[in-house]
Amino acid sequence: MQKKIKLKAMFTAVFVVCAMLSGCLGNKPDTSQSQAKETLYLFNSKGENAQQFKKMCDDFTAETGIPTSPFSVGSGQDALEPLRTQMNSKNPPAIFSMQGLKELPEWKEGGRVLDLSTVQDAEFKAIVDSIPDSMKLSADGKESYGIPFNVEGYGYMVDKQMLNDLFGEENGQKILDELKTCSYDDFTAFCLAVTDYINTSAAQPVILNGNSYSFNTQKTGLAQKLNGVFAFAGAEKWTYGDHLINVAMNAVFPDSRSAENTTAAQVDELKTPFVAYAKGLDFVSSHAAGLKAAAKRGSDLISQANFGYDQSIQMYADSNALFLQQGNWAYSNISKVNDEVARRSVFIPVKLPFTKDMIKTGKSVEDINSSIPVYVPNYYTINAKASETAQKQAMQFLVWLYKPENVQKYIVDSFESIPFNADESINIKNSLSVSILEYMEKDKILGAPYHGAPNIWSSEVVGKEIMEKYLVKENWSESDYEAISSFAVDQWKQMKNIK
Amino acid sequence: MEKYYRKWFWLLIMPSMLLFFFVIAIPFIVGTLYSFTSWRGTYFAGGSFLNSFVGFGNYIKAFSDERFIHSLVYTSLYTLAAVVAINLVALAFSLMLNNIKKGVGIYRTIFFLPNMLGGLAMGFVWQFIFQVVYTEILFSPDGLFHAEFLRYMTQNTTKALFALVIMTVWQSAGYMMLIYISGLNSIPGDLYEAAQIDGAGPVRRFFKVTLPLLMPSVTIVLFLTLANSFKLLDQNVALTNGNFNTRLIALQILRTVQDNTPPDYGTAQAQAVIFFVIVAVISLFQVSVTRRKEVEY
């Protein structure tokens, strides 16, 4: 009897532990198709808008009766690991997000991503067909694996009021317009004059596009707070590793697809644009502002405590710096520090000392130096291994989201993003987004070929090399420019295994 | 009581055994098997487990990766420095506290407190300390006293190693101190008296009485510090994130996944198995050596 009780107790213990662990072990996808309406699982990689994303899903459920279960990663958290975990779970997402060509091979090879160009549903097909070729998530241009979540852009942000305070109310807007189109030489001369003005309260007039403008005779308003030209985040490799180098890459590759399918000869063509990149970076990093006083290039400039992302935002929002190289995603961060500055900010293009012979895309030097990169940072993709019902519901969700009224309500108003198909019917208030739309309307936009470069090449390889070896050096020489350029080109070829 | 334990022995250890089996043993076996395949995190590269079998390919890849070898060497150096430093500081704390009469509880609490902080939080706190307090306030030319080698500690491979050691000593010494204190408390006072009567001074008493009888605690503390140092991750991520060639082996394994597209979990898994073997061999060797030094009285 005693033995029986003992055995029963043991089996109960085994059962309890197994039951506890069963949740961890089940990893087969739910392929049940018996229900007419399955729960639609969605993976959202933008933790910053988790609440708004959930609200959108709830609204969809209320309207269609399809139950939804969104999963958002933590704010600022890397999305790939949680996504892989979700994919291995009992309920893998039917809709997930992908950051572009760099992430496509993994999901394509694993058979997880649906080629949307094969879908027959008329309403959904219309959305897929409306994606401009340059925005397609496709390595060959024929397939199409995602619906753009939004578009983003970046450049040098500038506060219009700061220009008014430097050059007078009557000249502020004119200067801004000139800065959008001026040459690299005009731009650097302008920056040097601003540096003089900061240091001595007096400077020679600046000449932009042949027109001369004088500084205010006395420092007034925000100009009194300036201590440097650029808010430079030396500790953030991605700002010069990804974004600044991307401008140089536009000299050879118009988009990420062409960079992805490159040959060794084309990569070699990047050598001279990368020298221009190094010169441009030299100029920016030696005219950096600081939180208290102008910064000097050296070990301090890569300190996370003084020259990280947050500090660069602070410098710009506090008017310590005239320009900040960032994108429209930084709007809310700037707004938290100084909403007035955020609302007055617009973009001018990031300029580099290109010459005509460097550019292989058919554009002119003037074109590139008066355009800003605008690209799709994230795509909605459909899980090809989800059940047929779940796939159909996923398409139904995307068709619902891309109804014009929902684009305005969710993508623009709720997520504060720019829809890929933005037109005049869209009402955007965010000043930086409006600035991007203006560039888009004038077709003054560049691509994001860095998305097509080998994984981690731009930030973790080139950016890291620059941070560790060059930003800590006070002076750069011609041979440093050459070394940076050769390193970037050689590493690309090595990582891509092309000769 | 002994009868009770004998009777219910299997039932009482069953939950732990099952948890160990499901949470440690199975993942370990599966992980080891995956290290022989092209596992990509959510799928096998060849389509199935068998088709993606690469034999020792991932192990060869791991050993031919310069970054992996560097991180192995760097981790070994860090472990050596950290184990020595933590043990010396913990032992010094425990001897000091063993000899004071007032406020022992407060000191113990203060020394133990840093251990309550999570690794990431600790890393970020010390990043600020090294980048601002050390660099700008204490050791700058205008600071308390100028010591260039203590500035920019996170921007140099060697300095960062010592920065990590300083941080982990601060974190772990209090915890290890408690183990040493319990060891010291178990040494009978009459042995010291006898030694003193025989004419042994404080140093001789320490080496001839305290240390031999403290060996059980030394075995535990050495094992813990050795294992903890080898697998240090969070603090490494937060303090340097591997910049300036400061990847310890755990971070290297983590980054192997991100360094490749599609993610190379197979090779990362092979690195983890190599890592396990190294830590296991060193730890077992250390335990067997220090055990032999333990004495009974």
Image: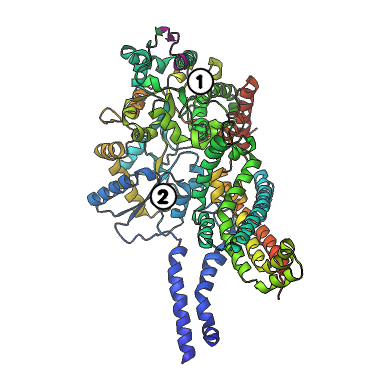
Q: Secondary structure at mark 2?
A: loop
Circle 2 crowding by C-alpha within 10 Å: few under 14, some 14–19, many from 20: many
* Residue matched to label 2: A383
Please state which of residues A438 and A471 is positioned toward the viewer in this rendering.
A471
- Residue A424 percent coordinates (x, y): 27, 27
Quadrant in the picture for residue B149: top right
Q: Residue at 36% across / 36% down in the picture?
A: A150
Tag 2 near tag 1, CB within 8 Å:
no
Which of the colour schemes (rainbow, by chain, secondary structure, one colour) is used?
A: rainbow
- Residue situated furthest bottom in the rendering: A1
Q: What segment carries the magenta color?
A: A197-211
Q: Is residue A199 covered in magenta?
A: yes
Q: Which mark is residue B76?
A: none
- Residue A168 percent coordinates (x, y): 33, 13
First in sequence: mark 2 vs mark 1 = 1
- Residue situated furthest left in the rendering: A63
Q: Is residue B131 above or below residue B51?
A: above
Q: Is residue A24 above or below residue B268?
A: below
Of the 4 image quadrants, the one containing the C terminus of chain A is top right
Q: Is residue A398 above or below residue A203?
A: below
Q: CA distance from mark 2 to mark 1?
A: 41 Å
Amino acid at the residue labelled 2: Asn
- Number of labelled discs? 2
- Residue B47 percent coordinates (x, y): 54, 54
Position of A86 compared to A412: left or right?
Answer: right
Position of A159 compared to B269: left or right?
Answer: left
Q: Is residue B30 covered in magenta?
A: no
* Residue matched to label 1: A352
Quadrant in the picture for residue A325: top left
Q: Chain of mark 1?
A: A
Q: Secondary structure at mark 1?
A: loop
Please state which of residues A224 and A89 is positioned toward the viewer in this rendering.
A224
